[in-house]
């Protein structure tokens, strides 16, 4: 994205829903969702996922960058609680993250290690080469 691309950084799920309702995420925009689980879980999580899915079907291009810890990703991928009936549903609970899972299925993932300690020397060498 060019340096002049609008960056949207909603503080919470309500702010993100407001951005999407106002159609403020236009072509060429960048949407930053730090700690994406805060947007995709809780009482508005599925509404946020639905709004983002609708926006993805709209005019582009635009970029969504999100951070999500592995344990939260696994929780969002879980179809419910209890025992599976073999069809993806779990007995006793509704599918709590169906739309979030559909949204995350479209994502391109960049896995970042929990620590860079093992590759710190390589990073230093690369930094010296980048003038």
Image (cartoon, rainbow, N blue to C red):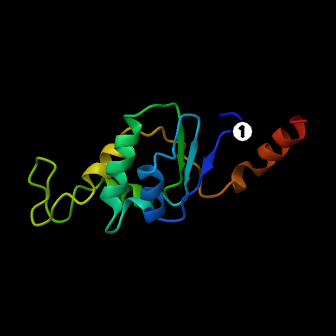
Report how many numbered discs are placed on residues in the image: 1
> Residue tagged by mark 1?
4
Q: Position of residue 79 (x, y in %)?
A: 23, 55
Residue drawn at x 46%, y 45% as measured from the top left: 23
Splitting the image into 4 quarters, where does residue 27 fall? top right
Residue drawn at x 49%, y 65% as measured from the top left: 12
Dot 1 crowding, Cα within 10 Å, few <14, some 14–19, many 20+? few
Residue drawn at x 10%, y 66% as measured from the top left: 92
76 relative position to 22: left or right: left
Q: Position of residue 26 (x, y in %)?
A: 52, 39
On screen, 109 above or below 66? above
Q: Position of residue 1 (x, y in %)?
A: 65, 34
Decide which of 95, 110 is in the foreground and name it. 95
Quadrant holding the C terminus: top right
User: Could you tell me if residue 70 is visible in this image?
Assistant: no
Decide which of 8, 46 is in the foreground and name it. 8
User: Could you tell me if residue 93 is visible in this image?
Assistant: yes
Residue drawn at x 80%, y 48% as measured from the top left: 121
On screen, 103 above or below 46? above
**SS label for mark 1:** loop
């Amino acid at each position: 994205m060019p340096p002049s691309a609008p960056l949207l950084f909603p503080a919470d799920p309500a702010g993100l829903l407001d951005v999407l309702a106002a159609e403020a995420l236009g072509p060429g925009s960048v949407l930053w969702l730090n700690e994406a689980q805060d947007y995709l879980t809780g009482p508005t999580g599925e509404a946020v996922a639905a709004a983002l899915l609708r926006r993805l079907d709209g005019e582009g291009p635009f970029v969504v960058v999100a951070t999500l810890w592995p344990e939260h990703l696994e929780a969002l991928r879980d179809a419910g609680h209890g025992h599976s009936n073999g069809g993806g549903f779990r007995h006793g609970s509704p599918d709590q993250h169906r739309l979030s899972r559909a949204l995350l299925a479209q994502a391109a993932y960049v896995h970042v290690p929990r620590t860079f300690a093992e590759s710190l020397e390589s990073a230093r060498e690369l930094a010296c080469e980048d003038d």
